[in-house]
Image (tube, rainbow, N blue to C red):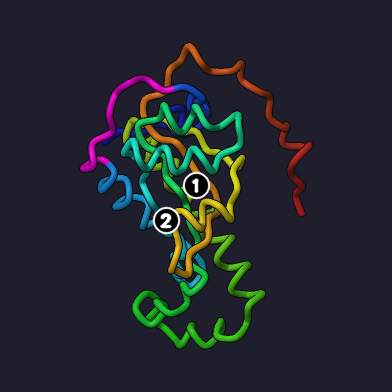
Amino acid sequence: MQVSTEQLFTEARTHNGWLPQPVPDALLYQLYELTKWGPTSANSSPARLIFVRTPEGKARLAACMAAGNVAKVEQAPVTAIIGMDMAFYERLPQLFLHTDAKSWFVGNDALIAATAFRNSSLQGAYLMLAARALGLDCGPMSGFDAARVDAEFWVGSTVKTNFVCSLGHGDPAKLFARSPRLAFDEACQLA
């Protein structure tokens, strides 16, 4: 598969509208198989994903979204809920074989929260890059009631919602004009 920087970054856009083209389950499996290889600290891999694609699932998620994001969830073929497992460290004996990394986290709620949030955010970004590499468009969103999403989708688990991202084939007619980005000297320093 030949993937370009244009496909991943400079020509890729955040989509707000979607074409009525389905995303097959096999592509979602392929998407996860790429996403899982992105690096996380101590290979912690705290992200947990729910791919919302049924009419019932979309209705449940749409009810948790801010008004401006409801139609995005309803129209997208798939919306991924990127969660963070707050007990990710229980899997470290399986995932990080070099040392007893689980002991770093047990009883350290601040470190657990920071590590889960930071690394599940990274994994969500890997998901979007993998989706773009596979020819899908992305529409990440943070306008939702996280507690409500947690109660609706993660009940009985140790997972909390980080953010959501619609996936599919974006409708170019519904794109906003491209927003500017900061120049190197505005965002970076050399030390």
User: In the rendered picture of this protein, how many numbered marks are placed on residues?
Assistant: 2
Depicted 130 relative to depicted 97: above or below: above
The residue at the point 44 percent across, 41 percent down is 128
Mark 2 highlights which residue? 38
Q: CA distance from mark 1 to mark 2?
A: 9 Å
Percent across and percent down for residue 15 are 49, 26
Residue 159 on the magenta segment:
no
Circle 1 is placed at which residue position? 125
Residue sitting nearer the eye, 141 or 30: 141
Three-letter code for the amino acid on which mark 2 is drawn: Gly
Give percent across and percent down for residue 96: 40, 77
Question: Badge 2, how many Cα within 10 Å: few under 14, some, many 20+?
Answer: some
Looking at the image, residue 187 lies above or below residue 16:
below
Q: Which secondary structure is most common in the magenta stretch?
A: loop
> x and y percent of residue 124 in the render?
48, 49
Helix or strand or loop: what does disc 2 sit on?
A: loop
Q: Look at the numbered discs 1 and 2 and tell me whether their residues touch, using CB distance below 8 Å.
A: yes
- Span highlighted in magenta in the image: 18-27
On screen, residue 99 versus residue 24, left or right, reads right
The amino acid type of the residue labelled 1 equals Ala
